[in-house]
Image (cartoon, coloured by chain):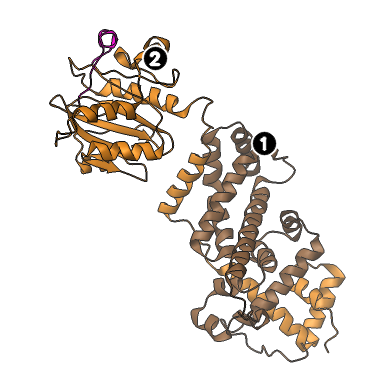
Chain colours: A orange, B brown
Amino acid sequence: MHDHDLDLIAEHASGLLTGADESRAAELVRTCEACAVEFADHSHVRTLLASAPAPTLSEFERTRLRRSVLDAMAPPKPAGAPWQRRFLAAAGAVAAIFVVVAGIGIVGQMSGGDDGLTLADGGEAADTTASAEALVPFDQLTRDAMGEQAADEDADLRFEADDAAATAMPQLLVEVGEIDAAVLDSVLAELSVAVMDASEPLGVEEAVAFGATCAFTVEDEILGLVLATVDGVSSQVFLIGDRTEPIVVILLSSDCSPPAP
Amino acid sequence: MNEPDRDRDLIARAATGDRAAFTELMDRHEDMVFAVAMRMMRDREAAFDATQETFLTLFRKADRYSGESAVSTWLYRVATNTCLDLLRKQKRRRTEALPDHHDQPDRSAGEPFESVEVRGDIQAALSSIPHDFRAAVVLSDIEGLSIAEIGVILGVPDGTVKSRVFRGRRLLAEKLGNLVEQPGRQRTDDA
């Protein structure tokens, strides 16, 4: 059995020794066959490893890495209902983009009192206390509308505006409400119109490819998009958000422009 | 401002939520982290995941950076520990997936010598040695770090680092020995 200190030889091969230790190890390498093999092994492996090209990220991976890490670094969502925050962002975008269709007023009501907003002129949220009584949940609104139009194979939607809301409302309807996934599915099923249902967030290109006359994204998310006709006006219903916290934005417009940069 | 000082400045800013500073920090170190992860994980996607997790950890713990060691040393530590954690999880998953009658492979047998030789695959050889040895060898012989630095990164004494490096190299030598001709190399039984 070899009784020399092979770790000493390994240290020598690693350049870790100096002085007397280095001399002793060098002497062993010269005079002891096993020590020479040990020295050669360590030197050989070190050389091979040091000369191996370093793996690098591809440009695609680099971009993906940056995006995923920086996305994860995004500040936590502020307190309060996420739909409310998203709605305000959506409202601003909607007001900036869409041509208002005159003469169409839609009542939005929320049964919960503080869970809904009505969009005022210029995209600013109206006083919620003033409009709360005029609000109904979107699914209820849709069901009511569908009840009236059930026999209509075109599934046109008709919304009745009450007097108070009609005078206060801009001609652009935005109805916002929280709908759970099951209700959302049922709403989409009832509409029986072209539905783009996405499990992943969609971009403008996908929406347009689907057949939307226009599309926009809020925080890069369009959960779904429904094309419908309201009072003869081609309309688009954007479902913005995710499955658990969808925000429904109904846009009564047949025209739109690209979002402002 | 020299490189370590620049890193310290960047991480201090990143700790306050400065995304631009963090982006620059990534720019400076992502290749290094990915290279270590690739050597440790072998699988590219797993290496990518480890790299991603390393930077997320860096961001989450940026405010805990004490400044005692270089940022790069700290990053090596986070990257290595992240890889070791992932490897342990992988091993657990593999173990859990095995049927009861499955015979454990003889790890001491290693990978067939010829396959490594034919593929010339240093990565395959690295992947065949125990994780702790692999980490020590990668940091020493590929990243060129000192024994003391590796001790800090792995959280073990210098003697342990040396032991892991040397034992790792011996295992690698058996697998890589004839990738390059070594005139006169004849291991004897008593060696």
Vertical order, A241 against B134 (above or below)? above
Q: Are marks 2 and 1 on the same chain?
A: no
How far from the left and from the top, in percent, is residue A224? Answer: 31, 38
Horizontal side of B152 relative to A93 (left or right) equals: right
Horizontal side of A199 relative to B72 (left or right) equals: left
Label 1, residues with CA under 10 Å away: few <14, some 14-19, many ≥20: some
Q: In the image, which residues are magenta?
A: A158-171
Residue at 44%, 49% (x, y): give it: A64
3D distance between C-alphas at marks 2 and 1: 45 Å
Image quadrant where residue B60 sits:
top right
Q: Quarter holding the C terminus of chain A?
A: top left
How far from the left and from the top, in percent, is residue A40? Answer: 69, 80
Vertical order, B50 against A134 (above or below)? below
Residue A87 inside the magenta-drawn segment: no
Q: What's the mark number on residue A132?
A: 2
Horizontal side of B16 relative to A249 (left or right) equals: right
